[in-house]
């Protein structure tokens, strides 16, 4: 997720009109940015207070390790 957040902070997220989905392999093109994130921070593992603080600032993205049989 960090790589995606870093990319959107630098390049932004394109508008649908400037970069329509085509569902084929190809090369990346330039686009008009609809949004650039202002940054991101990783939240400490198993820290309720860190999660509460992050939620107070804005959206939170969560990763789940789903490649084990325990999942």
Image: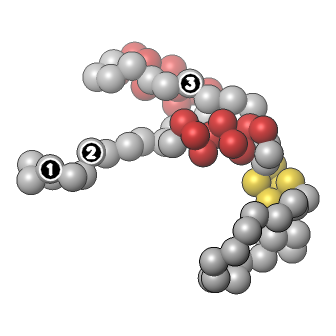
Horizontal side of 5 relative to 45 (left or right) equals right
Horizontal side of 49 relative to 33 (left or right) equals left
Quarter location, residue 38: top right
Height in image: 13 above or below 47? below
What is the secondary structure assignment of the residue under circle 3?
loop
Q: Are marks 3 and 2 in contact (CB under 8 Å)?
A: no
Query: Which residue is more in the foreground, 31 or 53?
Result: 31
For the residues marked 3 and 2, what is the alpha-carbon distance in whole angstroms? 19 Å
Q: Taking the image as drawn, is residue 18 in sight?
A: yes
Q: Which residue is mark 1?
A: 68
Tag 3 or tag 1, which sits nearer the N-term?
3
Question: How far across and down, in percent of the image, does residue 36 sit?
Answer: 79, 43
Residue at 81% from the left image edge and 70% from the top image edge? 19
Q: Which numbered circle lies on residue 56? A: none
Q: Are marks 1 and 2 in contact (CB under 8 Å)?
A: yes
Question: How far across and down, in percent of the image, does residue 2 sit?
Answer: 54, 36
Mark 3 residue crowding within 10 angstroms, few (<14) / some (14–19) / many (20+): few
Residue at 80% from the left image edge and 45% from the top image edge? 11
What is the secondary structure assignment of the residue under circle 2?
loop
Q: Which residue is mark 2?
A: 65
Q: Taking the image as drawn, is residue 37 in sight?
A: no
Horizontal side of 48 relative to 4 (left or right) equals left
Q: Which residue is mark 3?
A: 41
Mark 1 residue crowding within 10 angstroms, few (<14) / some (14–19) / many (20+): few
For the residues marked 1 and 2, what is the alpha-carbon distance in whole angstroms? 7 Å
């Amino acid at each position: 997720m960090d790589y995606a957040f870093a990319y959107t902070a630098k390049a932004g997220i394109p508008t649908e009109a400037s970069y329509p989905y085509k569902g084929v392999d190809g090369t990346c093109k330039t686009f008009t940015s609809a949004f650039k994130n202002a940054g991101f921070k990783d939240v400490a593992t198993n820290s309720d207070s860190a999660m509460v603080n992050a939620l107070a600032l804005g959206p939170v993205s969560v990763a789940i390790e789903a490649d084990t049989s325990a999942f």
